[in-house]
Image: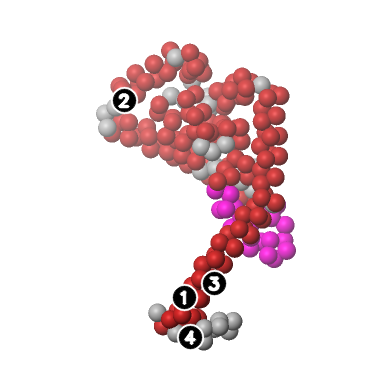
């Protein structure tokens, strides 16, 4: 209460102290909070929002031009090998489907690989934002917070964004491989080897899982 009284007595306050001045100070700063929020909203609408809409439209146009079936075949192809499974597959899924629908591409993988694919993909939804902010627009504030310091220095954020993206690709590959190994160990330790072998057979026989026969 003493702190509020002292704040109320700051220059610009007409109360000159006392309980009334405290409420005057609270009222002034309460509406000020919403005024600042309104200014931030206006900056977003006139700044990043048009870029997000244009990028998203361009990506949808590209997907339509390539063809959804060809994109799906490319994802299924990338699921064959460990290297592409945790690099190409997460990148394509995040760029094409955005967060959180990108995780649905896990249906192209056997059960034993799905935890690693999720770990790899969820780790890429932030490094992708510097150049493709539409892919994870709801969490764009993470990248904007990182880049704001560089912008205040008057330096281009492109080099930082490129390094952020490249390190992210290296991280998702590493996380995918490590999680896949951990999953295999846990399957053996919990005695579920036979159960997952049955899952693999069901996946191979499913119409969408033709790639499983090529493992």
Q: Mark 4, residues whose alpha carbon is within 10 Å: few (<14), some, or many (≥20)?
A: some
Task: Decide which of 147, 184 is in the foreground and name it.
Answer: 147
* Quadrant in the rendering for residue 52: top right
Q: Which mark is residue 23?
A: 1
Visual colour scheme: secondary structure
**Magenta stretch, main secondary structure class:** helix
Q: Mark 3, residues whose alpha carbon is within 10 Å: few (<14), some, or many (≥20)?
A: few
Q: Which mark is residue 17?
A: 4
Q: What distance separates the C-alpha of mark 2 from that of mark 4?
A: 74 Å
* Quadrant in the rendering for residue 168: top right
Mark found first going from the N terminus, 1 or 2: 1
Furthest residue toward bottom: 16
Furthest residue toward left: 191
Q: Mark 1, residues whose alpha carbon is within 10 Å: few (<14), some, or many (≥20)?
A: some
Q: What distance separates the C-alpha of mark 1 from that of mark 4?
A: 10 Å
The reply to whether discs 3 and 4 touch (Cβ–Cβ < 8 Å) is: no
Who's the residue at 59% across and 45% down the image?
Answer: 137
Q: Which residue is mark 2?
A: 193
Magenta stretch contains residue 125: no
Mark found first going from the N terminus, 3 or 1: 1
Q: Which mark is residue 185?
A: none
Disc nearest the viewer among 1 and 2:
1
Q: What distance separates the C-alpha of mark 1 from that of mark 2?
A: 67 Å
The reply to whether discs 3 and 2 touch (Cβ–Cβ < 8 Å) is: no
Q: Which residue is mark 3?
A: 28
Q: Secondary structure at mark 3?
A: helix
Residue 104 drawn at (x, y percent): 49, 29
Magenta region: 139-160
């Amino acid at each position: 209460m003493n702190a509020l009284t002292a704040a109320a007595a700051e220059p610009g306050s007409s109360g000159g102290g006392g309980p009334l001045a405290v409420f005057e100070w609270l009222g002034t700063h309460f509406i000020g909070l919403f005024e600042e929020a309104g200014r931030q909203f206006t900056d977003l609408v006139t700044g990043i929002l048009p870029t997000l809409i244009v990028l998203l439209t361009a990506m949808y146009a590209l997907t339509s031009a390539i063809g959804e079936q060809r994109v799906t075949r490319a994802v299924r192809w990338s699921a064959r090998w460990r290297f592409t499974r945790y690099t190409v597959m997460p990148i394509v899924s995040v760029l094409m489907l955005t967060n959180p629908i990108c995780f649905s591409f896990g249906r192209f993988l056997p059960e034993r690989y799905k935890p690693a694919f999720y770990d790899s993909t969820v780790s890429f939804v932030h490094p992708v934002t510097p150049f493709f902010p539409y892919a994870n627009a709801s969490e764009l504030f993470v990248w904007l917070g990182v880049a704001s310091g560089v912008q205040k220095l008057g330096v281009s954020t492109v080099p930082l964004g490129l390094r952020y993206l490249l390190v992210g690709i290296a991280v998702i590959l590493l996380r995918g491989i490590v999680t896949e190994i951990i999953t295999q160990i846990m399957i053996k330790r919990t005695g579920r080897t036979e159960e997952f072998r049955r899952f693999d057979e069901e996946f191979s026989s499913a119409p969408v899982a033709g790639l499983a026969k090529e493992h």
